[in-house]
Image: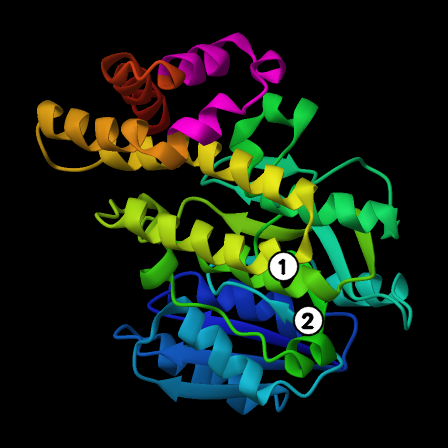
Amino acid sequence: MISIIIPVYNTAPYLPQCLDSLVNQTYRDIEIICVNDGSTDNSPDILKAYAERDSRILVIHQENLGLSGARNKGLESARGEWVMFVDSDDWIGTDCCKTLLSHTDKQTDVCLFSYIREFANQSFPQYLFSDKKMVYQGSSIHWLYARLIAPNDQELRLPGKIDSLSTAWGKLYKTSLIKEHGLRFVPVRQIGTEDLLFNVYYFTWVKKAIYLPDLFYHYRKNNITSLTKLYKPHLTEQWNLLFRLIEEWITPLHREDLEKALTYRRALSLIGQGLNITFSPVSFMKQHGALSAILSSHEYRTSIRQLPMNYFPIHWRLFFEMARFRSTTGVLCLLKLIKFIIER
């Protein structure tokens, strides 16, 4: 059985498409755990209607605890051998579960698959790696674990793909590993993004991973209420805590590749933190001061110095070279240009 956990919070316009993609799976032995996280729209009514028509749907109601709290609540009820997470404004292909299980065996600990970024009028396929099935075991699992934290070497030419592998969705997890080690999601309000840390914990025990190029997951990018569109005033502090928790976790493992990956992750996070600053409703000078504080910190100066600049395309090389020399004005102007392109 596969337990599919869906956190739900005010996504009524998109929820039916998500639920339809689940109840119509060609593999029938699934349980659909919907955690209503204090929705104030008619999402609870939609969940109730679907649950009345399909006994495989379990609806759990709780006060608003955020995405992490909803996922954790779902994990408490999961009875399947496998666990999958689907966000309630996204959807999956109807053959997803059947195909994933057909490629797993008793030794498989996780199955990863590709996705499509869905905009209002366009769809963009996103392959995690190649367009062929890949099996990771032994030393290749070590590479995959490090790549989960950050791109390395030649992959640095596309720093925007830093989180392509760290999402909780787009994966089939083994329930026994999660429960045996008591894994849970740390609230986003503490660390800024919950998926990466959960996967850093989980992959500690992964011995065999399967990658499928199938574009099963549809990641909606035209949801105007998406959290990714909101300014996050505490993002720098949250990510600093995230990096500290990852460092505390990987240090006892004595893995230089993981430590290097974390260094790259911290340096590349300057893009996300910088863009977040440009979305803040304060003056240019205050934005300049916030960015300057990051560029002047010892952790970021050290991390940026260790980036291998030769792999970056010229625009990103210029960005990180200016960051290396703490040219705050130059970095901020480039970020505002990126913001302008995003908003077009």
Residue that mark 1 sits on: 252
Give the total number of marks visible in the rendering: 2
* Residue sitting nearer the eye, 344 or 197: 197
Residue that mark 2 sits on: 24
* Residue sitting nearer the eye, 200 or 281: 200
Image quadrant in which the N terminus is located: bottom right
Task: Tell me, yes or no, whether the highlighted magenta stretch contains residue 319.
Answer: yes
Q: Which residues are magenta?
A: 301-322
Left of 150 or right of it: where is 137? right
Please tell me whether residue 95 is drawn above or below residue 271 in the rendered image.
below
Left of 58 or right of it: where is 225? left
Q: Quadrant of residue 103?
A: bottom right
Q: Position of residue 156 (x, y in %)?
A: 60, 25
Left of 169 or right of it: where is 187? left
Q: Is residue 169 visible?
A: no
Left of 101 or right of it: where is 310? left
**Residue neighbourhood size for the residue with mark 2, other residues' Cα within 10 Å, grouped as few (<14), some (14–19), many (≥20):** few
Q: Position of residue 102 (x, y in %)?
A: 89, 65
Q: How is the image coloured?
A: rainbow
Please tell me whether residue 45 is drawn above or below residue 236 in the rendered image.
below
**Tag 1: amino acid:** Pro
**Residue neighbourhood size for the residue with mark 1, other residues' Cα within 10 Å, grouped as few (<14), some (14–19), many (≥20):** few
**Tag 2: amino acid:** Asn
Please tell me whether residue 340 is drawn above or below residue 80 in the rendered image.
above
**Who's the residue at 24% across and 34% down the image?**
277
Q: Secondary structure at mark 2?
A: loop
